[in-house]
Image: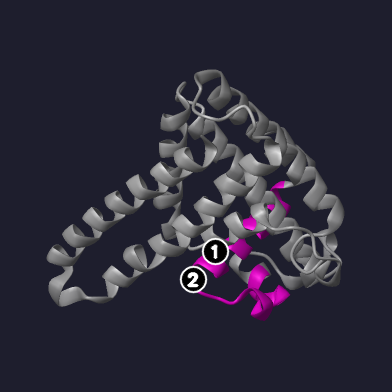
Amino acid sequence: MDFAEKYTEKQIHIFEAVMTLLREGRQIHELKVADIAGSAGMGKSTAYEYFSSKEEIIREALTFHLRKSFLELTAYIFQEKKFSRMMENALDYLDESLEKRFTGVFVVLLSQKHDRKNAGSLMDEEMRLKLETVVIDQMKKALMIGQNEGQIGEDIGLPEFKMVVFGLFSAYVHELFPLKIGGCMMEPQKIEGDEINALEISELKKRTLTLILKALA
C-alpha cells in the first residue's frame, strides 16, 4: 500500500503494538509509551525517536490502521459487480473483523463529524481530511454503481448515501457485538448458543441489507 511507504518498519511495529494492546482489552487513554514500546519489542527511548508523544503515536496508529482497514474493506466490497452484493460483502467484512475488537471504533471514526473541541484527541484535522478523501472516492464509486443499476434513487446524493451506509453499518456493529462476544461467555451451552447466534446474525445481516436498499431506493 502506497500510504505505508512513508513509515519505517519500526513505526509500523509500534502501530501494530497499539492495536494489539487495544485488542487485548486495554483502554485507549490508559496506554503508556512504555507498554506500547514493550509490545513492539523495543525500548521506550526508541519509540520517542520516531514520535514526540503518546498522543502522536496513538493518532498515527489509528489513522494507519483505519486507512488500512478501509482499503481492505473496499477491495473486498468491489470484488462484486452488483451493488446489493457489495453491501453484503461489507456486512460480511464487518462481521469477520469484529473479533479484532476494533471494528466499532473504525465505523464511528469514519462516520463522525469533526468536533473542534476534541480536535487531536484521536485524529488531528489533517489526518482526518486525508482519510476522508479516500473514503469519499470509494463511496462515489459505489454510489455510481448503485444508481446505474437502479438500486439507488437519482435524488440520492453523496451526503445522503454516506449517512445511510455508515449509519446502518454503525447500527449493525452495535447489534452484532453482543451476538459475537456475548455468546462466548456461555460455555455450558456453547454449541447450542453458537447455532442460535449464527441464525440471529444471519437475520440481522438480512435486515440491515434490506434497510440499506430501502433507504437508498
**Residue at 43% across, 31% down:** 84
Check residue 30 for magenta coloring.
yes
Q: Quadrant of residue 75?
A: top right
Mark 2 closeness class: few <14, some 14–19, many ≥20 residues within 10 Å: few
Check contact, mark 1 vs mark 2: CB within 8 A. Answer: yes
Mark 1 closeness class: few <14, some 14–19, many ≥20 residues within 10 Å: some
Q: Amino acid at mark 2?
A: Glu
Q: Which mark is residue 24?
A: 2
Instruction: Give the percent coordinates (x, y) of residue 28.
Output: 64, 73
> Circle 1 is placed at which residue position?
20
Q: Nearer the viewer, residue 209 or 37?
A: 209
**Residue at 64% across, 75% down:** 35
Q: Which residues are magenta?
A: 9-36
Q: Nearer the viewer, residue 28 or 165?
A: 165
Which residue is outermost to the bottom?
A: 30
Q: Is residue 40 visible?
A: no
Left or right side of 73 for 118: right
Secondary structure, mark 2, is: loop
Q: Quadrant of the N terminus?
A: top right
Q: Amino acid at mark 1?
A: Thr
Q: How many marks?
A: 2
Looking at the image, is 138 positioned above or below residue 62? above
